[in-house]
Image: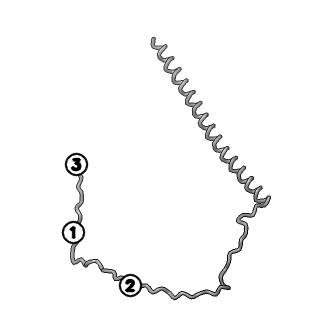
Amino acid sequence: MLRPKIPTMPTPVGVTAPPAVVQPTAVDPAPQTMAPAAALVVPTARPTAQITPGSVLAVVGAGTAVVLVVGTVLVSMLLATAVTAASVAVCAVVVRSLLTSSNKRRR
């Protein structure tokens, strides 16, 4: 009654065709043409990065902004944790005082 019913694999109905056989075909490479020596392009040597005072200032400004944003987020998370811990401590003190005062009144 509580056993799961596992479906059985259905058997194919009707005429089934065998899988088609793929015949390999030959690939003819395209004829290669030789380019004249004058047409070859030689890359020129140039510096990879241009360091200017403006780019240095931009990098320093971006780094400062990132540090300020990450610092603000971390300080706010720390503050939220401190506020939560303080409120839990206050709740624990209140609950403890309520329990001890109710025990003193019973006697």
Mark identifier at residue 25: 2
Q: Nearer the viewer, residue 22 or 39?
A: 39
Mark 2 / mark 3, whichever is N-terminal: 3
Type of amino acid under label 2: Thr
Mark 1 / mark 3, whichever is N-terminal: 3
Mark 1 / mark 2, whichever is N-terminal: 1
**Residue indicated by mark 3:** 2
Q: Secondary structure at mark 2?
A: loop
Cα separation between marks 1 and 2: 36 Å
Residue visible at 49% across and 20% down in the picture? 99
Q: Quadrant of residue 93?
A: top right
Q: Quadrant of the C terminus?
A: top left
Give above or below for 88 relative to 56: above
Cα separation between marks 1 and 3: 27 Å
Q: In x, y percent, where is residue 24?
A: 36, 82
Q: Secondary structure at mark 1?
A: loop
Residue visible at 33% across and 80% down in the picture? 22
Outermost residue toward the left in this view: 1
Type of amino acid under label 1: Thr
Give above or below for 88 relative to 63: above
Give above or below for 69 relative to 98: below
